[in-house]
Amino acid sequence: MRKKVFVLCVLVLLLSFFVSAEKAREGLKVFISVDMEGTGGVIHWEDVSRKGKDYDLFRRLMTQETNATIEGALEAGATEILVRDSHGSARNILPDVLRPEAVLLRDWSDGPLSMMEGIDETFDAVIFIGYHARAGTPNAVLKHTMTGTIYDVVLNGKKMPEAGINGAIAGYFGVPVVFIAGDLAVCKQAKELFGDIETAAVKEGIGKAAKMLHPQKAQELIKKKTTLALKRLKDFKPFRLKPPFKMEVTFKDEERAENASWIPGAKRTGNTSVSFTSNDFMEVLKFFKFAM
Ligand SMILES: [Zn+2]
């Protein structure tokens, strides 16, 4: 009998330890995925390519926009911030210029989480900055979907920009998208998918040209909107799609579709398109990873 009481006491002690450990983290844990095409000032592929003459300028602006987001998050009470460099080489953000309050995730593991690498269910909110509209969007800066080879991605009947796919990944882990910064076109696409999230349109496309906010103004707006979004965190719900998950990828050329059609479980649905269906969203992401 005594032994039972002792075991019970130990269990109660352990439970109270875990409850207090959980309570100890009262601040917000924020995940920031940073792309580059939607950074204020950026207009051309050369701006976002290592080989471009002005790349150093734009990677600095990308880092400053990230810092503005971090500052906004800190002001709203964030205590843990993970920044995922999500563009090209994933080695764009300047580590020494980045605010020290954040942890930076660089390079690709080649896993299916891609631009959302590092996300898990312990995060409170997801933020996208430097984002761009999906392939084929009019009046949008450097629009594309993941690679230059994809014409369109449709997930459970919805046309998806990268923000949509990444938002669904966040939703898979139960984390809501609360704020997006980029051009006006991606802000509109994000609202269509996620509802009334906060947005910061730092530029507005006119064909492939664009009107730009001054980088300083863009960064002020991003900081302000980040704080605003995190302060109304309870208004946002994770973007959860319902199983079965069906993804259809249409490529710009037929050869890509031919290659992707050999992925186990994939179905050729047209000259340039392939689809994949599963009740496990992670399986769909794996298909997408290999199809690209
Ligand atoms: Zn990019």
Image (tube, helix red, strand yellow):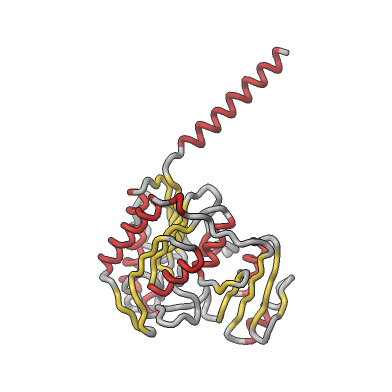
**In the visual, does 182 lie left or right of 279?**
left
Q: Quadrant of residue 272?
A: bottom right
Residue at image x 46%, y 35%?
24
Residue at image x 39%, y 65%?
181
For the N terminus, the image quarter is top right
Residue at image x 28%, y 68%?
215
For the C terminus, the image quarter is bottom right
Residue at image x 62%, y 20%?
9
Q: Is residue 61 above or below residue 118?
A: below
Q: Quadrant of residue 65?
A: bottom left
Task: Find residue 70 and report its horizontal and vertical position in percent.
Answer: 36, 54
Residue furthest to the top in view is 2
Task: Find residue 219 and report its horizontal and vertical position in percent.
Answer: 30, 63
Q: Is residue 48 above or below residue 224?
A: below
Task: Find residue 188 and report its horizontal and vertical position in percent.
Answer: 43, 71
Q: Quadrant of ligand 1?
A: bottom left
Q: Quadrant of residue 218?
A: bottom left
How many labels, in total? 0
**In the visual, does 99 lie left or right of 278?**
left
**In the visual, does 94 lie left or right of 122?**
left
